Amino acid sequence: MKKDSVRSASYTVDCEDFVQVVEFSPFDSGTPASLLAYGGNQYVAVGTCTFQEEDSDVDGVEFTTCRIFHQGVRVDCIAWSPESRLDVIPRRIRFCTAAADRNIRIFTSDLQDKHEIKVVEGHSDYINQVVFEPREGHQIASVSDDLTCRIWDLDGKQETSFLLRSPGMSVCWHPEDAFKLMVAEKNGLVRFYDLLTQQAILSLDCGQTPLMSADWCFGNTIKVGAVAGNDWVIWDITRSSYPQEKRPAHVDCARSFRWSKANENLFATTGYPGKLKSQLLVHHLGHPQPVMIGYASVGAGLSWHRTLPLCVIGGDRKLFFWITEM
């Protein structure tokens, strides 16, 4: 592993609390700035950010907090709705969270006077991920340690439920294939469900446990990636139900896997937080070793920018951003 691949964060932004989770909106906000939300022990902060790679007048990163939403309980997951837009009057922000009290909350705001929070109850255990239907944003999918994947409408009514064989760790809804849902389970299995027939139509097996995180490639729908045990694994779903590629990643078990939205061959993984720092690895399918290694103080969360090869993780009162030069 090359020493020059170890890099400090390209940019940092100060926060008021420890950051549990952070998410770029994967959708166009209608303005040059990107929407970003991060959650702490009591609240969610929503802001916009612009980077010098997008605007030469910006020195590093320009982050503007739009609003702080208090929910009174630890935020564990955040998902953005495609309905969030900054180029309309009034502005419209919609996102949802999963929290330590096992409830989902749907936030809708104009970032001025109108704010609505809908609490969605139903899961009986920890919720590991939530995601909006990516075309219209009228549904939310969630997976939980209670061995279910559930689909909800915006009023909080459960529309569909899939019974899982182990805790649901990740759920993905792809904008190019909105009638399929990808669900990854802790036992190492990844299944695709047809939402019209409500049947499983494809299964992938990473061959090891525990699977902690999986993602469906934004730029290429035949690619699926995950971390299980200490390794990352990649599938070509047109070839085999077993991984096409697998390599060791983190010594003390891998925690998160996310594909870049700007480059279909680029992805990032994180390890479990150590006593002082957490490890971020950025990988490229054409390189045997990580192309970048980063460290953050007890980091949490992982998300990629919508158009730049730039990812963010949260930490102790900071957001850490890394730009990957490919």
Image: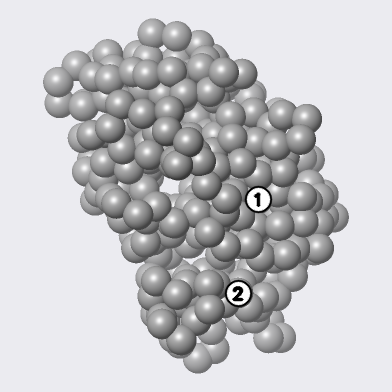
Q: Is residue 103 left or right of residue 16?
A: left
* First in sequence: mark 1 vs mark 2: 2
For the point 14% across and 20% down, the residue is 239
For the point 19% across and 16% down, the residue is 240
- Per the model, the C-alpha gap separating discs 1 and 2 is 14 Å
For the point 36% across and 28% down, the residue is 289
Q: Which mark is residue 314?
A: 1
Callout 2, which amino acid?
Phe
Where does the N terminus fall, quadrant-wise?
top left
The residue singled out by tag 2 in the image is 63
x and y, in percent, of residue 173 in the image: 37, 45
Q: Is residue 117 visible?
A: no
Depth check: give the residue in front, 175 or 239.
239
Q: Is residue 42 left or right of residue 292?
A: right
For the point 55% across and 72% down, the residue is 61
Is the residue marked by circle 2 packed among few (<14), some (14-19), or many (20+) residues within 10 Å? Answer: some
Callout 1, which amino acid?
Gly
x and y, in percent, of residue 283 in the image: 37, 36
Depth check: give the residue in front, 157 or 60.
60
Is the residue marked by circle 1 packed among few (<14), some (14-19), or many (20+) residues within 10 Å? Answer: many
Q: Is residue 108 left or right of residue 219?
A: right
Q: Look at the numbered disc 2 and give the secondary structure of its residue.
A: strand
Q: Is residue 206 above or below residue 69?
A: above
x and y, in percent, of residue 168 in the image: 53, 26
Q: Is residue 90 above or below residue 286?
A: below
Q: Is residue 205 above or below residue 70?
A: above
Q: Look at the numbered disc 1 and give the secondary structure of its residue.
A: strand
Depth check: give the residue in front, 153 or 17.
17
x and y, in percent, of residue 37 in the image: 61, 62
Tell which residue pokes out farthest to the top in this image: 207
Q: Is residue 125 above or below residue 130?
A: above
Q: Is residue 276 visible?
A: yes
